[in-house]
Image (cartoon, rainbow, N blue to C red):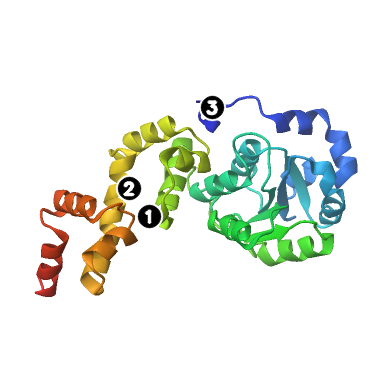
Amino acid sequence: MFSIWQVVALPSQRFVHDSTADMQEMSGYDHAAFEGHPARQRLLVVAGQPAGLRPVTGLLSTRFALTFATDGLSGVHRAQGQRPDLVLMDTCLPGVVDGLVACRLLKADGQTAAIPVLLMSDLTEPDDRVRGLEAGAADYICKPLWPAEVLARVRVHLPDAALPVPEPLDPELAHVSAAKSLIEAQLATLPSAPELARQVGVGARRLRELFRRHTGLTLQAYISEQRIRASLPLLEKTSMSVNGVAFEVGFRTPGNFSTAFRARTGMTPQAWRRQRALGF
């Protein structure tokens, strides 16, 4: 399976370059305003069907410079290249990189991490909204969209001043960094390797290769290391049983926890807890 960073042909390039006049008429896209007038705040709109956003983009274009992408991959690339002040992105996008994956990749890359991402979605259940916010979105706007509401939310989240832009992150590291964030946030309920890889836009084999290359550890070894790290304050500062700690940090059995803990520290969890209680 190809990494999403290896894809060359981007659907949105056809959309923007072949249909520039249509885009200008539809939503006020102004390339000169976006590139040539940095004082005007700039919005990147990522939507599979931009025509469906005509009322929203029409209103936004009277106040901001807009540019567009029609899939998650090109949205990530445009954000890295253009560094807009805000990204307005649909959660449902064509291809393997949906809005949630694209948001995670933007937040994992230092040069785009500070850009607010506002997600738009037909998925309106509380769990859907939570998933969007956990992916790093600054806001989650449920459809049907009301243009004045979208404008108000955009104004709330637009930065007051430009921040220094860090050095660009190696594209491979964006996948690794996004996966690390998911692992740390979901230690107790971590999905399978294929599902974890899907959530950061690569295949499971590719994710394992990237972890070995950039961390020196296998994916499973990295997960085990993070679980051991998370267990230490629970053992030291709480009265939770060792079995309870094991399940809290995601080990399937207390035996697996003890084996991994001994390999990492040279002692059992019980012995480590007693040692810490004595001040060692």
| Residue type (three-letter) at the residue carrying disc 1 | Leu
User: Given contact means CB atoms under 8 Å apart, are the residues at marks 1 and 2 in contact?
Assistant: yes
| Residue type (three-letter) at the residue carrying disc 2 | Ile
Question: Residue 7 location, x and y as percent?
Answer: 58, 27
Q: Which residue is mark 1?
A: 187
User: Given contact means CB atoms under 8 Å apart, are the residues at marks 3 and 2 in contact?
Assistant: no
Question: Residue 80 location, x and y as percent?
Answer: 59, 42
- Location of residue 274 by image quarter: bottom left
- Location of residue 101 by image quarter: top right
Q: Which residue does the image show at 49% across and 34% down from the upper left? A: 202
Residue 149: mark in rendering:
none
> Within 10 angstroms of label 3, few (less than 14), some, or many (20 or more) residues?
few
Q: Which residue does the image show at 80% across and 56% down from the upper left? A: 144
| Residue type (three-letter) at the residue carrying disc 3 | Gln
User: Whole-Å distance between the Cαs marked 1 and 2?
Assistant: 8 Å
Instruction: Give the SS element for disc 1.
Output: helix
- Location of residue 115 by image quarter: bottom right
Q: Does label 1 or label 2 sit earlier along the sequence?
A: 1
Residue 6: mark in rendering:
3
> Within 10 angstroms of label 1, few (less than 14), some, or many (20 or more) residues?
some
Task: Give 149 or 114, whichever is nearer the viewer.
Answer: 149
Task: Give 120 or 194, whichever is nearer the viewer.
Answer: 194
